[in-house]
Amino acid sequence: MKFKKIWWTDSIFIIMTIASFTGLLIPAGQINPKFVGIPYTVWVGVLFCILYVIVAYIASKLQEEGPDDH
């Protein structure tokens, strides 16, 4: 069961990485719409950074060794 959870976190990380380097979420040459005067691309970048940290935290918690895992 633990392996399946780790596999899901790795898959989510890979999908997010692929999506962030393609034009799926950040259209090329487009800075509109703006929110609070900040371009869309910056907001998407900040959102992805937060999501990367959350996924990395979850993966690290899943891979921690318990007292009997030595």
Image (cartoon, helix red, strand yellow):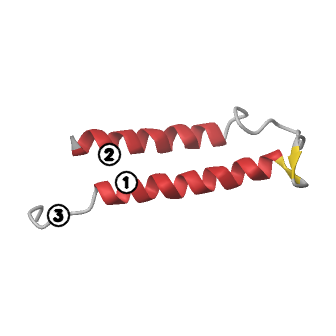
Q: For mark 2, give the secondary structure.
A: helix
Residue at the limit of the structure toward the top, as seen here: 24
Three-letter code, disc 2: Ile
- Disc 3 crowd rating (10 Å Cα; few below 14, some 14-19, many 20+) is few
Three-letter code, disc 1: Ala
Which residue is tagged 3?
A: 66
Which residue is tagged 2?
A: 6
Q: Is residue 70 shown left or right of residue 32? A: left
Mark closest to the chain's N terminus, 2 or 1: 2
Mark closest to the chain's N terminus, 2 or 3: 2
Residue shown at 73%/34% (left/top)? Answer: 23
The answer to whether the residues at label 2 and label 1 have Cβ atoms under 8 Å apart is yes
Q: For mark 3, give the secondary structure.
A: loop
Q: Looking at the picture, does residue 68 appear above or below residue 29?
A: below
Residue shown at 88%/39% (left/top)? Answer: 30
Q: For mark 1, give the secondary structure.
A: helix
Question: What is the quadrant of the N terminus in the image?
Answer: top left
- Disc 2 crowd rating (10 Å Cα; few below 14, some 14-19, many 20+) is some
Q: Quadrant of residue 31?
A: top right
Mark closest to the chain's N terminus, 1 or 3: 1
Q: Looking at the picture, does residue 22 appear above or below residue 9?
A: above
Question: Which label sits on residue 59?
Answer: 1
